[in-house]
Amino acid sequence: MQPRIAIPFPYFDHAWSSRTLPEYMNAITLAGGEPLVIAHSATPALAAHLVKTCAAIVLPGSPADIDPQKYGEARDPRTAPADPARDMLDELLLQDAHAMRKPILGICYGIQSLNVWRSGTLVQHIESAVVHQRPEGVPKGTVISHDAVVQRESRLGEILIHEVQVAEASGEQHVKSGLAEGPELKLTVNSYHHQSVGRLGDGLRIVALSPRDGVIEAVENASADHFILGVQWHPERSYQHDACSRAIFAALVEAARQWHERMERGNHDFETVAPGL
């Protein structure tokens, strides 16, 4: 059974979204899931109906920034315009996923959306010597990266340790054995963001930081009984060549599969077939 994973259309600019959306869909598909894209133009009623057919959600990145009024701050001049339609979809999907305890994966803008939805704030523009986004003038497609440290005693830590063990056993040379040493796991992540989580949202905990400047790189649900993970980097962009990126999507899809099986065993009244669009 391939669990269906809801993903909102990332951004109102269709050209931008058409370039980036296939990477998320490919990662979900290769991990064993079935992506269901919810259109930017979907009405709340249609979006609510579609998400009922899904066992998990992925909140993707976006060049938009969340309106600072949502978390009680004045707008920084460097904050990008908001995308109200995307925000509406995120809020609707998050509401459904929390009500039904469906697995959630937030990526870049997605982790920020999750944090604000849970009453947290954002750093509107990161001031740091660490490069967190592609510098002006650097050609598009250039991969910029920085370090992150992940708490070993976390859901994300468990995901990464397991994948490293599997990858090393199979002889994958690009996985560093040092990742699994010590109380923290060292990771190299890509840099595509100028904002980050500020004050932590209710019920979330920090599980990864940029060690040089303290920027929050990942959060997860404080309670282990609900799969909620947000990462500030883009694992879908490194899926093909990075075992840790693949592990994140594999863990989400497995959590979605287990959620679906629990619903079936419990005879819950939930949709299984998406309507035609």
Image: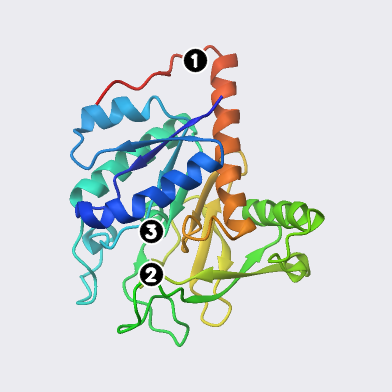
In the picture, the disc for residue 112 is 3
Question: Which quarter of the figure has residue 209?
Answer: bottom right
Query: Is the residue 76 above or below the residue 29 in the image?
Result: below
Marked residue nearer the N-terminal end (3 or 2): 3
Q: Label 2, label 1: how many angstroms apart (C-alpha)?
A: 40 Å
The quarter of the image holding the C terminus is top left
**Residue marked by disc 1:** 268
Q: Residues within 10 Å of mark 3 (few under 14, many from 20)?
A: many
Front disc: 2 or 1? 2
Q: Position of residue 246 (x, y in %)?
A: 59, 51
Q: Nearer the viewer, residue 58 or 91?
A: 58
Query: Is the residue 82 above or below the residue 149 in the image?
Result: above
The quarter of the image holding the N terminus is top right
Residue drawn 38% across the image and 69% down it: 193
Tell me the amino acid under the disc marked 1. His
Asked whether, in this view, residue 182 is left or right of residue 135, the answer is: right
Front disc: 3 or 2? 2
Tell me the amino acid under the disc marked 2. His
**Residue marked by disc 2:** 193
